[in-house]
């Protein structure tokens, strides 16, 4: 790293919701959410140009300009999706998951020039002199399918070179990937030098496959992980007893996942532990995990996350989950 990042803190602020993810929220509500997180001591804030096509960055920048005049916050944003003008867009409709007044849409572009322009535009929207962490957004087969090899080559030969230059010049402190899959993280660690990985949904109370390859490789390389999507798209937040089919991996959960979550939920309930508390706290037990990033779209969600991450969980709860085969034997658990 070209500059020390400092402690990210166990709980980070995911700013997709203030970019109007799935639904519009008023600007004053977005301001209030960031303010509550700041007052609660959260100092790491993650956003992206894709979130509301610039709206999330604008709202986060406006809030932090008032709350953080000294620039103490650690801010991450992403590159790899350029914002193309769409003056004809229906601004009242959901577009790429967002209901946003910004007349743009995001288009994948991992080229050198696109990454440099994206960084410069993010600085302006965020109203900051620097961005601390820069992630390449959604590289990998999860997003690109059969086109992944071409996209990955485009990134390694272009966008990654730009990110390296930004880090080497001191313009950013750390670079990495912000993705939904472990395989591309392993691929990237074999292709270049990165500092951080933001991994969404793949190392959770429900999924621990990264213990096989990715996490040992990160330990060997000194790479930290930030775990986004700790609720696996909602199923670990809502559980399976609501009478509706919860989401898993952005889609309705299959029967096998519902059954597994039900078994986890039953054991947690026997120990008086809310399922989302166990979900938030579990990833943090691994020494390579620096922070977890749940989405926060309201003051109530901020307060709930704060309560959940500090909720006492008896050691026997983790022991029972392990004995039932619901946590891998080699998975660290909170103590």
Image (spheres, rainbow, N blue to C red):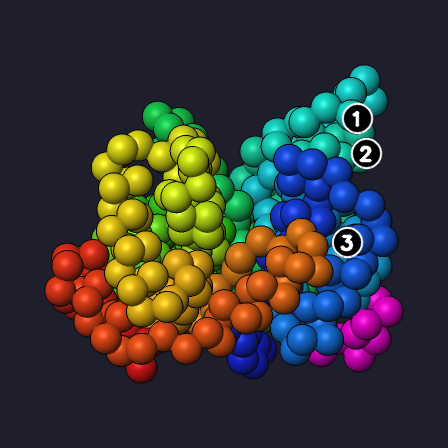
Residue 239 appears left or right of 212? right
Q: What element carries label 2?
A: loop
The tag on residue 101 is: 2
* Left/right of residue 43 with respect to residue 204 in the rendered view: right
Q: What element carries label 3?
A: helix
Q: Residue 91 carries which label?
A: 1
Residue name at image x 57 percent, y 42 percent: 80
The residue under label 3 is 30
Query: Can residue 53 be seen in the rendering of this structure?
Result: no
> In the rendered view, does 160 fall on the left or right side of 133?
left
- Of labels 3 and 1, earlier in sequence is 3
- The alpha-carbon separation of the residues under discs 3 and 1 comes to 18 Å
Q: Residue at x 63, y 63 (%)?
A: 302
Of badges 3 and 1, the one in the foreground is 3
60 or 301, which lies in front?
A: 301
Q: Is mark 1 on a helix, strand or loop?
A: loop
Please report whichever mark, 3 or 2, sits nearer to the chain's N-terminal start. 3
Picture residue at 43% right of the left edge, 36% below the top: 243
Q: Give the range drawn in magenta.
A: 65-74
| Residue 267 or residue 124, whichever sits in front | 267
Whether tag 1 and tag 2 are in contact, CB under 8 A, the answer is: yes
Q: Count neighbours of disc 2 (C-alpha within 10 A) and say few if under 14, some if 14 to 19, many if 20 or more.
A: some
């Amino acid at each position: 790293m070209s500059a020390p990042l400092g402690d990210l803190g166990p709980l980070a602020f995911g700013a997709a919701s203030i970019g109007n993810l799935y639904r519009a929220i008023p600007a004053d509500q977005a301001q209030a959410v960031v303010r509550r997180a700041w007052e609660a001591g959260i100092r790491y804030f993650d956003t992206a140009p894709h979130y509301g096509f610039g709206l999330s960055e604008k709202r986060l920048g406006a809030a932090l300009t008032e709350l953080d005049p000294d620039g103490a916050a650690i801010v991450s944003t992403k590159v790899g999706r350029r914002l193309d003008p769409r003056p004809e867009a229906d601004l009242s409709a959901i577009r790429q998951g967002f209901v946003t007044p910004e007349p743009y849409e995001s288009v994948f572009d991992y080229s050198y020039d696109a990454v440099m322009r994206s960084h410069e535009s993010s600085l302006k929207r965020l109203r900051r002199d620097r961005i601390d962490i820069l992630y390449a957004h959604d590289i990998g087969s999860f997003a690109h399918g059969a086109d992944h090899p071409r996209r990955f080559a485009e990134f390694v030969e272009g966008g990654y070179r730009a990110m390296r230059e930004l880090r080497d010049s001191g313009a950013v402190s750390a670079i990495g990937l912000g993705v939904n899959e472990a395989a591309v993280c392993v691929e990237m660690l074999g292709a270049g030098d990165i500092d951080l990985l933001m991994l969404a949904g793949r190392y959770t109370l429900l999924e621990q496959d990264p213990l096989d390859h990715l996490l040992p490789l990160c330990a060997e390389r000194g790479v930290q992980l930030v775990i986004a999507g700790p609720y696996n798209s909602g199923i670990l937040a809502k559980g399976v007893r609501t009478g509706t089919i919860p989401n898993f991996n952005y889609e309705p959960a299959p029967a096998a996942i519902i059954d597994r979550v039900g078994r986890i939920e039953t054991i947690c309930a026997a120990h008086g532990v809310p399922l989302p508390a166990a979900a938030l706290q579990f990833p943090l037990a691994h020494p390579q995990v620096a922070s977890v990033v749940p989405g926060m779209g309201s003051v109530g969600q901020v307060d709930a996350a704060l309560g959940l991450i500090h909720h006492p969980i008896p050691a026997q709860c983790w022991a029972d989950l392990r004995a039932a085969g619901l946590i891998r034997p080699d998975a660290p658990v909170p103590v």
